[in-house]
Image (cartoon, grey):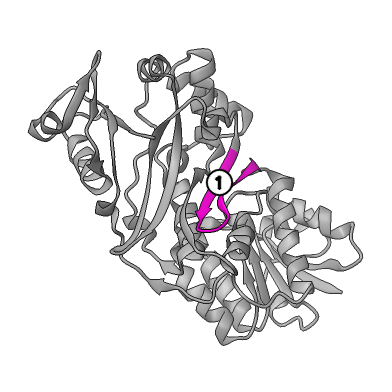
Amino acid sequence: MMKLGLFGYGVVGGGVGRIADGRDDMEVGRILVLPHEVDVDPRTVTNINDILTDESIDTVVEVMGGIHPAFEFVSSALKAGKNVVTANKALVAAYYKELIALAKENNVTFRCTAAVGGGIPWLVNLSRVRRVDTIESVWGIMNGTTNYILSSMTAQDVDFADVLKKAQELGYAEADPTADIDGHDIRRKLAISVGVAFDAAVEEANIPTFGIRNVTSADIQAFRNMGRTCKLLAYGQMTPDGVAAYVEPTIFTNDRLEASVGTNYNMISYKSNNAGIQSFYGQGAGRFPTAYNVVSDCLDIIAGEDSFYTDKAEPTALACGSVSHAYYVRTNVCDEFLSSITEEKGEGWVITAPVSVEKMHAWAQKQKEIDAGVFFAGIQ
């Protein structure tokens, strides 16, 4: 029987505990919590060494969140010869190479399926297709908060601020929604995804990212008039120059599957040489959907899975200059660059000729200095 040590016992940790307690092939031995949380369960401890030195515990589940002290705790568990399963996307994106290397050095297993897609079995399927095929690209709607906001604005003709407030009331958005609406959360998931898809260790912080903070109801109406729907998209593609990986609002024609993904759901896809396009749809977060994938990782370890999703983590350059497409752009200040690429003008917005992702994101970051409300969306 697998014996678990839990690092954290909040929403997801509690879900893992509930599922594990109902099974006969695993049990929770100890739970590491903060000193003021010791009464949540009789198995709680406040000293990590109580878990690290417990030889009966073979697998640690990290669901405490954040980067520090999660990295130090997970590193200690790997060095102590414990398998590690985590749902912590921030941790994995920040220390991707280091965690894979530590697991190899100590002959233990490291898994993080729940870190990308919550309850969607995305990473395991990326790993599976790679056994017989080559992945060309990955993309998807990987953040439920932003999808809820954009879906609501599209369906109800309401303003961004009002929908964000409603999302916070429903628990879809944090009190500080920065990580979601500015694209940091989806960027972390993309960094992990391209790592598994392309054996590429990229610097997450360097991935060009533009969120939905500045989208307006007028933008949404313009998209309706075009027969398009806006989503916050993560995209990754292997090119001869490196990995083109970026996050940006994107407008899809209404016949695309992405356009129909509603509320707080996610949809993530890959395209491979032989299998073509395959898409995975479901709850991208939530207590039990996320806990389900954590426990599934534990079951994989019980079944003999002893590796990460890929054996390689090669430092890889970002090559967003290799991918180009047209953009919808709204700004109060039209400069020489924007004028030079404009092909169509609307009421307060323009459509550009195809322009590289690298150039468009660099321009937008600079443009924010003179027009804080600038907004753009890639066109697919």
Residue that mark 1 sits on? 268
Element assignment for label 1: strand
Residue 372, given in percent of the width and then of the height, sits at 24, 30
Residue 171, given in percent of the width and then of the height, sits at 62, 33
Question: How many neighbours does mark 1 have within 10 angstroms: few (below 14), some (14-19), or many (20 or more)?
Answer: many
Give the residue displayed 53% in from the left and 21% down from the top.
152
* The furthest residue to the left: 336
Q: Is residue 241 visible?
A: yes
Whether residue 283 is in magenta: the answer is yes
Q: Tag count in the figure?
A: 1
* The furthest residue to the right: 24
Q: Which residues are magenta?
A: 266-284
Give the residue displayed 82% in from the left and 55% down from the top.
19
Residue 318, given in percent of the width and then of the height, sits at 31, 60
Above or below, 196 relative to 180: below
Q: The N terminus lies in which quarter of the figure?
A: bottom right
Q: The C terminus lies in which quarter of the figure?
A: top left
Whether residue 242 is in magenta: the answer is no
Which residue occupies the foreground of this view, 57 or 272? 272
